[in-house]
């Protein structure tokens, strides 16, 4: 089947290692192996898939390191490795994917411990990145902070302790396009971050952290927000009047904080 372009074997009970059969199907453009019981290492057979556009091997039992076999996938636009048992550092194999447009990359729910410094250095077209539910440590690497095309960034439940550099670097983007940011369930501390330059934000998840102090009035400048979750922090003082003026707001969670005084007037919340 050397001319095969589309292959979907998802949601079966296939087990064992991913077979080497794909090494001879270099014409493949779409390959879906998710929701099976594949285990072991990711095979080197993927190295020959130079035409692949979408690759989904999520929700299996794959383990070991992410190989550099993906460096040759110059046409890749959708890549899902989530919900496996992959470990170690996220390699710089992704840095070679510089010509990609509208790329979705999902590495969530693995055992990845960190990133090499240039993991995403050249992925200037990356739009959606999910690293959540991995035991990452420290702050968000600078190579991610420079991704000015990001629209959705999820990095919840990753043991993060700092993300001010991400905010500062993203604020310098000519046109900040980030519309969904999830930093929930980490160990972020300090005052509420200044996100006024993130004018495209529609979803902001900062719950289950250790932010303290007051929620600033400037949060009202995020006029496109329809979901704001600040629950489970140590925020105190009054609820800003400006929150009540966000006309697009559909979901607001301020529970499990230390907020006091009256609830402000609102055009949208009754």
Image (spheres, grey):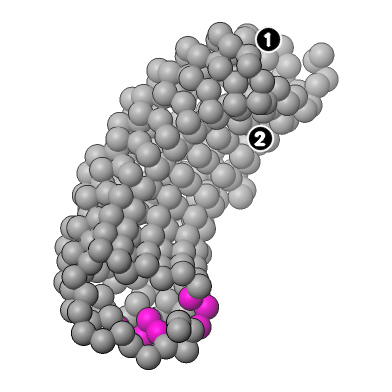
Q: Relative to 118, say whether 147 is above or below.
A: below
Q: Is residue 219 above or below residue 5?
A: below
> Is 117 or 198 nearer to us in this picture?
198
Residue 243 lies in the magenta stretch? yes
Please tell me which residue is depicted at 33% across the width and 44% down the height of the picture: 157
Q: Identify the disc placed on residue 54.
A: 2
Residue closest to the eye, 266 or 163? 266
Magenta residues? 240-249
Marks 1 and 2: in contact by CB < 8 Å?
no
Q: Please tell me in which quadrant of the rendered image residue 239 appears.
A: bottom left
Label 2: state its secondary structure: strand
Residue 75 position, x and y percent, is: 65, 36
Cα distance between the residues tagged 2 and 1: 18 Å
Q: Position of residue 268 (x, y in %)?
A: 48, 84
Query: Pointer 2: residues within 10 angstroms few (<14), some, or many (20+)?
Result: some
**Viewer can see residue 72:** no
209 displayed left or right of 53 = left
Please state, as top left, top right, bottom left or bottom right, where the C terminus lies in the image. bottom left
In the structure shown, which secondary structural element does the residue marked by tag 1 occupy?
A: helix
Would you name the residue on which mark 1 appears?
Answer: 21
Q: Which mark is residue 198?
A: none
Q: Total of numbered circles in the picture?
A: 2
Mark 2 or mark 1: name the one nearer the start of the chain.
1
Left or right? Give the position of 34 relative to 262: right
Residue at 60% from the left image edge and 26% from the top image edge: 35
Residue 211 at x, y percent in the picture: 21, 62
- Residue 270 lies in the magenta-colored region: no
Q: Residue at x 80, y 21 (%)?
A: 4
């Amino acid at each position: 089947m050397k001319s095969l372009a589309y292959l979907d074997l998802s949601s079966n009970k296939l087990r064992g290692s991913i077979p080497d059969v794909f090494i001879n199907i270099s014409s493949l453009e779409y390959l879906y192996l998710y929701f099976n019981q594949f285990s072991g290492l990711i095979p080197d057979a993927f190295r020959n898939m130079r035409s692949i556009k979408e690759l989904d091997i999520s929700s299996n039992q794959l383990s070991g390191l992410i190989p550099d076999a993906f460096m040759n996938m110059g046409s890749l636009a959708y890549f899902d490795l989530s919900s496996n048992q992959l470990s170690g550092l996220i390699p710089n194999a992704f840095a070679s994917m510089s010509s990609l447009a509208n790329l979705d990359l999902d590495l969530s729910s693995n055992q990845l411990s960190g990133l090499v410094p240039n993991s995403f250095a050249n992925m200037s077209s990356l739009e959606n990145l999910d690293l959540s539910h991995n035991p990452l440590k420290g702050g968000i690497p600078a190579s991610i902070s420079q991704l000015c095309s990001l629209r959705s960034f999820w990095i919840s439940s990753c043991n993060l302790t700092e993300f001010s550099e991400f905010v500062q670097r993203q604020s310098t983007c000519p046109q900040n396009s980030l519309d969904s940011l999830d930093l929930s369930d980490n160990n972020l501390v300090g005052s509420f971050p200044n996100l006024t330059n993130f004018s495209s934000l529609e979803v902001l998840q900062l719950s289950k952290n250790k932010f303290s102090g007051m929620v600033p009035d400037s949060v009202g400048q995020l006029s496109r927000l329809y979901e704001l979750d600040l629950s489970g922090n140590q925020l105190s003082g009054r609820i800003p009047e400006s929150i009540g003026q966000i006309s697009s707001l559909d979901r607001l969670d301020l529970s499990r904080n230390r907020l006091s005084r009256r609830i402000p007037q609102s055009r949208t919340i009754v």
